[in-house]
């Protein structure tokens, strides 16, 4: 990365952003707009269209018409692949521009943003594009007098509602397989992270994607997201975000056309360190980065640290050292390791958790608002060194740089603490005992369990949760299951 080039891009004035509907950039039907506040310095970056029900209906109608006409779904898979690969190449060519745009809007440190946003999105699109002409139907082993064929067909119009922490990466986990499968899409970005996805939709058109195939409508979830969920013309709804919103989307789907709904609803992931971990210092370093990078705004963040009691004090000291070594600051500075909190509202919520822990008499290391003079939204990493299982900081998702540390004595107690959560998205185990590692993987209720590492899984493995972390899977070839229907042909010969 070149700091001088980043500084040029960060200073570029931004014109008002519009929806991308049916291949055109359009303003809100009532002329409404929303201010885009930068968490970097608290200033207004630009405005974007405040979507209406009418805007959302227009986008859904465009996606429906594009799907029913066959301009996308009836293309040979190899042709769709070519367009998608063109799109991925354009994203890569504009990667730094997209990364800086995203950082200005949501505060992720630029080093992570470049890799985890545009470059990740391009890789995801390429992965599914390369796979789509390798998905086969089936021939059933039937009586020779009959032929049983199982076809895989695109499910139709997909509605997607994506979060603000990694909008391009998580968005691509949804539109990558959906569009590759032949579906069309209406995507609603988060209110505080929309600009990059609008730009991606514009690049899709440049790549040759037909009008109406990929539509982006910006605005409020209570309007745009709700309208997508209640539409009779949306066949599949995919969402990453809060449990309360997920419930409302399920209710809307039930009231409308019983569309399939797939939810990723976050987590309170346990990171379990045994005394026989291969390298305690490395475990502490990785654990610190597993919660404090991107200001803790990561769905799978290891926000509950369970440490074997006989190393608890030593490990907390190591953890605090590594946390203090993380440079928090302007996310557009290449030396920064953890950027801004996404919004002032989120910052206040983070600090409330910290103050509540202090009020309970817990030992809290760090956790102050910092760099307030910049006008941006920053806080130092917070470690609650002696959290109890009944504490709110142990039970509830903060979605910020706040870590609850709890000691345990036995393997059975570690499992009980790990599973004492309504969530089940991710977990980790640090141990040199291979048998213990396998036992723990089986016993912990989570969709993703790390062993002697945290984070960094690639596209080849699925990501999904259990319990109130949701259903369905992003990533890997399993993601196609959400966007493909099985159709059986039973033929008498």
Image (cartoon, helix red, strand yellow):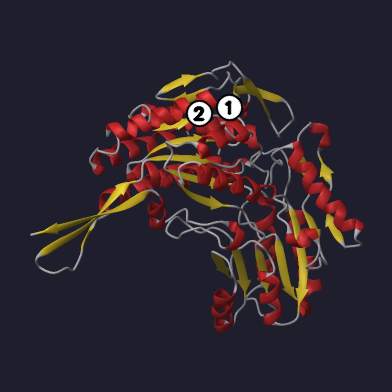
**Residue farthest to the front, as pictured:** 255
Q: Residue 393 at x, y = what percent?
A: 78, 58
Task: Determine which residue is flagged by label 1.
Answer: 9
Q: Residue 375 at x, y = what percent?
A: 79, 31
Q: What's the mark number on residue 27?
A: none
At horizontal 61% and vertical 35% (from top left) the residue drawn is 221
* Closer to the eye: label 2 or 1: 2
At horizontal 39% and vertical 27% (from top left) the residue drawn is 62
Q: Is residue 118 visible?
A: no
At horizontal 53% and vertical 18% (from top left) the residue drawn is 27
Task: Determine which residue is flagged by label 2.
Answer: 56
Q: Which is nearer the eye, 316 or 30?
A: 30
Q: Residue 225 at x, y = what percent?
A: 56, 36
Check the image and report above or below for 36 versus 163.
above
Quarter of the figure that contains the N terminus: top right
Q: Are circles 2 and 1 on residues that touch, CB within 8 Å? A: no
Q: Quadrant of residue 144?
A: bottom left
Q: Is residue 195 visible?
A: yes
Q: Which is nearer the eye, 168 or 319?
A: 168
Q: Secondary structure at mark 2?
A: helix
Q: Which is nearer the eye, 269 or 433?
A: 269
**Residue farthest to the top, as pictured:** 31
Total labels drawn:
2
Quarter of the figure that contains the C terminus: bottom left
Q: CA distance from mark 2 to mark 1?
A: 31 Å
Q: Residue 264 at x, y = what percent?
A: 56, 52
């Amino acid at each position: 990365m070149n700091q001088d080039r980043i500084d040029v891009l960060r200073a570029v004035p931004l014109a008002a952003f519009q929806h991308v509907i049916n291949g055109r950039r359009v303003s809100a039907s009532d002329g409404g707009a929303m201010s885009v506040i930068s968490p970097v310095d608290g200033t207004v970056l630009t405005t974007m269209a405040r979507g209406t029900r009418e805007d959302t209906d227009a986008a859904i109608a465009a996606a429906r018409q594009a799907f029913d006409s066959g301009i996308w779904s009836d293309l040979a898979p190899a042709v769709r692949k070519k367009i998608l690969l063109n799109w991925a190449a354009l994203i890569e060519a504009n990667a730094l521009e997209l990364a800086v745009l995203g950082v200005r809007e949501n505060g992720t440190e630029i080093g992570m943003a470049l890799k985890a946003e545009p470059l990740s999105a391009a890789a995801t699109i390429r992965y599914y594009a390369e796979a789509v002409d390798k998905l086969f139907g089936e021939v059933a082993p039937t009586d020779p007098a009959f032929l049983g064929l199982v076809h895989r067909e695109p499910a139709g119009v997909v509605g997607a509602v994506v979060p603000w922490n990694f909008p391009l990466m998580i968005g691509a986990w949804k539109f990558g397989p959906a569009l590759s499968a032949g579906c069309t899409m209406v995507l609603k970005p988060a209110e505080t992270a929309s600009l990059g996805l609008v730009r991606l939709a514009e690049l899709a058109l440049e790549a040759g994607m037909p009008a109406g195939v990929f539509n982006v409508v910006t605005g409020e979830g209570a309007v745009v997201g709700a309208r997508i969920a209640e539409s009779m013309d949306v066949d599949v709804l995919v969402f990453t975000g809060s449990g309360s919103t997920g419930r409302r989307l399920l209710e809307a789907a039930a009231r409308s056309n019983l569309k399939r709904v797939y939810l990723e609803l976050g987590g309170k992931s346990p990171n379990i360190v045994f005394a026989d971990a291969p390298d305690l210092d490395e475990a502490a370093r990785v654990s610190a980065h597993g919660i404090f990078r991107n200001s803790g705004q990561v769905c799978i963040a290891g926000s509950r640290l369970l440490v074997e009691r006989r190393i608890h004090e030593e490990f907390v000291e190591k953890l605090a050292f590594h946390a203090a070594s993380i440079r928090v600051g302007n996310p557009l500075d290449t030396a920064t390791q953890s950027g801004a909190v996404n919004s002032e509202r989120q910052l206040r919520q983070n600090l409330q958790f910290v103050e509540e822990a202090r009020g309970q008499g817990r030992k809290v290391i760090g956790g102050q608002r910092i760099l307030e003079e910049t006008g941006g939204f920053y806080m130092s990493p917070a470690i609650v060194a002696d959290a109890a299982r009944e504490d709110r900081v142990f039970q509830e998702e903060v979605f910020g740089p706040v870590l609850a540390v709890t000691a345990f004595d036995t393997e059975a107690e570690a499992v009980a603490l790990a599973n004492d959560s309504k969530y089940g998205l991710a977990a980790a185990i640090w141990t040199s005992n291979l048998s213990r590692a396998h036992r723990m993987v089986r016993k912990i209720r989570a969709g993703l369990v790390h062993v002697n590492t945290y984070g960094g899984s690639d596209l080849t493995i699925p990501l999904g949760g259990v319990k109130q972390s949701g259903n369905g899977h992003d990533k890997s070839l399993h993601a196609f299951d959400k966007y493909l229907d099985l159709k059986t042909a039973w033929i008498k010969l």
